[in-house]
Amino acid sequence: MKILILGAGKMGSFFVDLLSFDHETAVYDVDPKRLRFMYNTQRFTTIEEIEAFKPELVINAVTLKYTLDVFRSIMPHLPKDCIISDIASVKTGLREFYAECGMRYVSTHPMFGPTFANLGALSNENAIIISEGDYMGRLFFRDLYNHLGLHICEYTFDEHDETVAYSLSIPFVSTFVFAAVMKHQDAPGTTFKRHMQIARGVLGEDDTLLREILFNPRTSGQVSKIRDELKDLLHIIDNKDEQALNEYLKRIREHIK
C-alpha cells in the first residue's frame, strides 16, 4: 500500500519506522530539517510531490492545532478513493469534518503518546479505533495495532471523548495542581522526583492538546470529583480523624486493585 504520513514529529517518525518496510511510504513536512533523519521512505516538502505519489492511505500525525488545516490543504491533491486518517488524542471537530469532506476516513487514538511510552515495547498499551470510519481503514489499523500487541477498543466518537475526559483530564489536572504548589527541593525523595518527571512530560505537551482536553465538555464533571475528594481529605486532615483516614485509604486502595 502507498501510505503518506503527515508530520515528521515523534509519532510521524514512529509510523514511518513501523510501516516503511512493508509498504511504500512517504512523509510530508513543511520543515525540511525535520526530514533529515527519516530512513527508508520518500521525503516530501511540497503539495506537488504528494499529488504525484498518489497515496492510498494518509495518516495525519501533525500537531493537533494543525490537523484540520493540513487535511484541508492536501485533500484536493489526493486520489478520490484515498482513505484519510488521524491519530489525534482529542477528536474535537473531526467528526463534523469527516462527515462533510466526502472522503473515506478512519480515526484512531494510540493511547501511548511519545512522552512516556516506550515505543519499542507496546504490549501493555492500548489503542482506540473509532467505529464510525471506513471498514477497510478500520481493518488496516486493527491489523497494525494487533501486530504491536496493543489492547484495542472500538468506540464511537462520543464514547472516545468520554473516555479521554476521564483518562486524560484527571491525571492532567492532578499534575497541574502538583506543579502549581510545588517548591524546589535540594534533596527530593523518590516519589517527588517521579511526580516531577510526570509534570515535566505533561507540561511539555502542545498547548492546543492541553486546552482541548480541559475544554472537553465532560472534563468539568471529572475535575469536580477531584475538588470533592480534596474537600473530604482536607476535612480528615484538619480533624486528625484516624478512623476516617483508615476508611478513606481502604476505599481508594480498592480503586487501584
Image (tube, grey):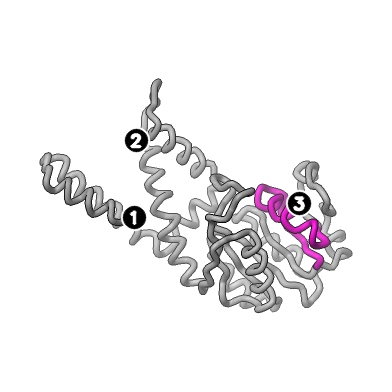
- For marks 3 and 1 on the same chain, the one whose residue lies earlier in the sequence: 3
Say if 73 sits above or below 31 in the image.
Answer: below
Secondary structure category for the residue under label 3: loop
Q: Residue extending furthest top?
A: 186
Which residue matches tag 1?
Answer: 257
- Residue 175: percent from left, percent from top: 40, 44
Inspect this view and state whether residue 212 appears.
yes
Q: Nearer the viewer, mark 3 or mark 1?
A: 1
For the residues marked 1 and 2, what is the alpha-carbon distance in whole angstroms? 29 Å
User: Can you tell which mark lies on residue 29?
Assistant: 3
Secondary structure category for the residue under label 2: helix
Q: Is residue 165 magenta?
A: no
Which quarter of the rendered picture does the N terminus lie within?
A: bottom right
For the residues marked 3 and 2, what is the alpha-carbon distance in whole angstroms? 39 Å
Q: Residues within 10 Å of mark 3 (few under 14, many from 20)?
A: some
Q: Is residue 23 magenta?
A: yes
For the residues marked 3 and 1, what is the alpha-carbon distance in whole angstroms? 44 Å
Which sits in the foreground, 149 or 77?
149
Which residue matches tag 2?
Answer: 181
Q: Residues within 10 Å of mark 2 (few under 14, many from 20)?
A: few
Left or right, 14 with respect to 168, comes to right
Q: Nearer the viewer, mark 1 or mark 2?
A: 1
Secondary structure category for the residue under label 1: loop
Q: Amino acid at mark 2?
A: Val
Q: Amino acid at mark 3?
A: Asp
- Residue 196: percent from left, percent from top: 44, 35
- The answer to the question of whether label 1 and label 2 lie on touching residues, with beta carbons closer than 8 A, is no
